[in-house]
Amino acid sequence: MKRVKAGIIGVGYIGISHVEAIRRLGFAELVAVADANPDLARAKSAEYFIPTCYDTLEELLADPEIEIVHNCTPNNLHYEINAKII
């Protein structure tokens, strides 16, 4: 089975839950994260050994390697961000 490459937008409490969930899947690889707080994104990227950290949502979405995006932002931001993801 081909391994799919995933990115996470939002690395707060729920985002970190998704980090752990992705890592439990045999067919997925977490390759990048981004957060509205770039310092938090860099800290979590280093803490969880995530190879790429982006400062913005747009940078993450421009990465051609990423095939799946987990939107782990607050609920009130989902519509706007999901529209960009799609």
Image (cartoon, rainbow, N blue to C red):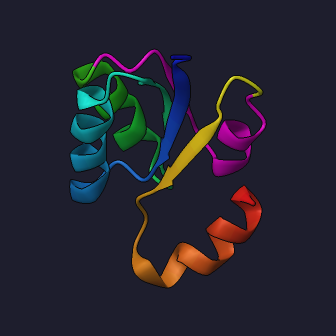
Residue 56 belongs to the span the image colors magenta: yes
Compare residues 44 and 1 and report the one nearer the observer.
1
In front of the other: 26 or 12? 26
Q: Residue at x 40, y 59 (%)?
A: 72
User: Residue sitting at 63 percent across and 46 percent down?
Assistant: 56
Magenta residues, as a range? Answer: 49-63
Task: Please provide percent x and percent y for residue 29.
Answer: 44, 22
- Above or below, 72 against 63 in this view is below
In reply to whether residue 29 is colored magenta, the answer given is: no
- Quadrant of the frame with the C terminus: bottom right
Q: Compared with residue 56, is residue 82 higher up or lower down, i.e. above or below?
A: below
Report x, y in % for residue 2: 56, 17
Q: Is residue 73 left or right of residue 20?
A: right
62 shown above or below 69: above
Residue at x 75% of width, y 62% of height: 84
Q: Quadrant of residue 64?
A: top right
